[in-house]
Amino acid sequence: MTGAPPAAGIWPWAMWGLAAIFYSYGFFQRVAPSVMVAELMRDFSVGAAITGILSALYFYAYASLQVPVGVILDRWGARRLLTGAALLAALGSLFFSQAQDLMPAYLGRALIGIGASVTWVGALKVATVWFPPRRFALVTGLTMAAGMVGAVGGQAPLSAAVAAFGWRATLVGAGLAGLALALAIWLVVRDRPPGERDDKPASEEGRRLLSGLVVALKNPQTHFIGLYGGLLAAPMLAFAGLWGVPYLMLRHGIERPAAAAATSVFLVGWGVGSPLVGWLSDRIGLRRIPMMLCVGLALASTLVWLFWPGLPLAACYPFFFLTGMCAGGMVLCFASAREHNPAWTAGATLGLANMMVIGNGAIWQSLIGWFLDLGWDGTMANGVRVYSQAIWDRALLALPLCYLGAFLLLLGVRETHCKAQKS
């Protein structure tokens, strides 16, 4: 990625805005299954384990492409790749909406993940090309905020749409919106300012990425940090991204719209916590202490809302928000991993770290579903498996276990004092 001349006028913001909307759309699709768990179980005649795998295919596809996507972006340019990715995500949504059995549903969900895999790095590519460096941090934070808007939209508003129109018609609408977004990206986004040439051979960029990947993989700090970030984020990706709505409906005896609204509190906290934790870490010049605080507070708050007997839903909200906010500590794994590796490996290091973070979300979504089916006593209601509160409590022990694992990994992470370390 090349440095950019100062941005002028509205067009840089329009181009970045469409890329940010696409990132928001990807987040919307990421959490969408959480408000249609019962419908998916009923229509595909499956239990929690298969539902978890179905939802997690988005994450598997997304995570597997995080390392090479930067090279592909440099070779094709943001305009073509973002347009093609939006088309894939839209077609995946349409395909998924019409699936009558599991294999087409798997394919549709995977296509959505493949398309969405470009959203984050694509938005940052547009920001790199069209904005001056002094605005990059601002635009990055705004991009993350756009993602959280999409995640919140995939909770209560999507739940209302599913209740009104059904999950299939709702996903058809999401697919058509994706097609319109692809057209808008093609019409508005440009790869670089007029007159600027990109003379860097794509083959050279590919070789550099591969070399950087080898260096990052050989560094134990990369693994400690990436897996820490993955386990810190996994409860949010697994719970808020899929299992939160059905759990809260049972635990607190509420309807799906209210449960979806409650789940949104986690995501709002995550959106607030990401820039806040990053700012605090930069401000005090430390990485490990904020990372430790995040995992400790996330564990404590989760134990409160998960296991405090008789705690009213309203009293849970502050703990939901705190859990989500502490998950924002995930952003420090990217900064710390970059500081522990040579600067020229940044693309490979960040891609590898992101793969570990998203990959953990996929694994734990599936595992919690498997734990639920393992304890299922055979009870059915309207063609959907029913899991007792005791089964849910055992399955969701996975959440505090993730935080304990993140804490143990953090013991192996060295402090960088927010500075690049000598290799």
Image: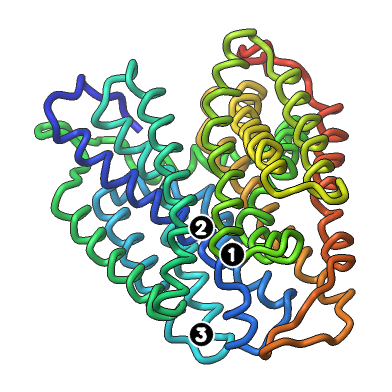
Residue at x-position 68% and y-position 70%: 52
Q: Please tell me whether mark 3 or mark 2 is closer to you in this view.
A: 2
| Nearer to the camera, 290 or 337 | 290
Picture coordinates of residue 39, whole percent (x, y): 57, 80
Looking at the rendered structure, the kind of residue marked 1 is: Ser
Please give left or right for residue 367 compared with residue 132 in the image.
right
| Nearer to the camera, 237 or 253 | 253
Residue at x-position 45% and y-position 37%: 144
User: Visible in this render: residue 212?
Assistant: no
Q: Secondary structure at mark 2?
A: loop
Looking at the rendered structure, the kind of residue marked 3 is: Pro
Vertical arrangement, residue 184 with respect to residue 107, above or below: above
**Which residue, given by chain and number where applicable, does mark 3 sit on?**
104
Q: Secondary structure at mark 3?
A: helix
Picture coordinates of residue 302, whole percent (x, y): 78, 42
- In the image as oriented, which residue stretches furthest toward the top? 284
**Which residue, given by chain and number where applicable, does mark 1 sit on?**
34
Residue at x-position 28% and y-position 70%: 176
